[in-house]
Amino acid sequence: MSTTIKTRIIKIGNSQGIRIPKTLLELSGIQTEVEIEVKGDHLTIRQIPQLRVGWDHTFMSMAEQQDDKLLDEANLSSWDQVEWEW
């Protein structure tokens, strides 16, 4: 489904911008930070992907299944043992 709304470019300090109507933001799901890409005469605005979403749940699940252990031995140097607080 495509929704098109006309708007104007406005002056914002030394820059210019557009106001994005609430309806379009709700339809797009965009909430906070965005990235803007230029392709020819088009601007594409999209929400920045939320990396690592769900990792907390995945790590807790791994810990419950005791699947969060190192696969190899840790090779600690004397510097690691002296300088780091474990």
Image (tube, rainbow, N blue to C red):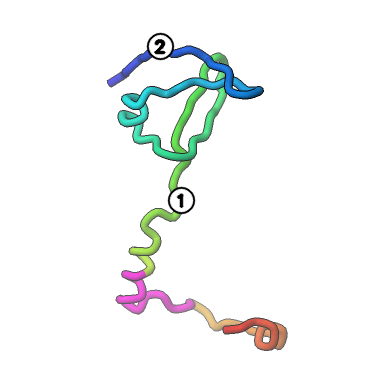
Instruction: Work out whether residue 72 or residue 8 is closer to the camera in this orientation and state it.
Output: 8
Quarter occupied by residue 84 = bottom right
- Stretch in magenta: 60-70
Rendered location of residue 55, percent (x, y) = 40, 60
Q: Residue at x 31, y 25 (%)?
A: 23
Please, is residue 47 above or below residue 41 in the view?
below
Disc 2 from disc 1: Cα separation = 32 Å
Rendered location of residue 61, percent (x, y) = 31, 69
Mark 1 secondary-structure assignment: loop
Mark 2 secondary-structure assignment: loop
- Write down the residue under mark 2: 6
What quarter of the picture does the C terminus occupy?
A: bottom right
Amino acid type assigned to the residue bearing label 2 in the image: Lys
| 85 within the magenta span | no
Rendered location of residue 31, percent (x, y) = 40, 38
Q: Residue at x 45, y 32 (%)?
A: 46
- Write down the residue under mark 1: 51
In the orientation shown, which residue stands out farthest toward the left?
1
Amino acid type assigned to the residue bearing label 1 in the image: Leu
Please, is residue 55 above or below residue 69 in the view?
above
Question: In the displayed structure, does residue 60 sit left or right of residue 49?
Answer: left
Mark before the other along the chain sequence, 2 or 1 = 2
Q: Residue at x 58, y 23 (%)?
A: 12
Crowd class of label 2 (few under 14; some 14 to 19; many from 20; radius 10 Å): few
Please, is residue 81 above or below residue 55 in the view?
below
Q: Residue at x 27, y 21 (%)?
A: 1
Question: In the displayed structure, does residue 74 sit left or right of residue 32?
Answer: right
Question: In the displayed structure, does residue 37 sit left or right of residue 22?
Answer: right
Instruction: Work out whether residue 20 or residue 60 is closer to the camera in this orientation and state it.
Output: 20
Rendered location of residue 47, percent (x, y) = 44, 37
In the orientation shown, which residue stands out farthest toward the right?
79
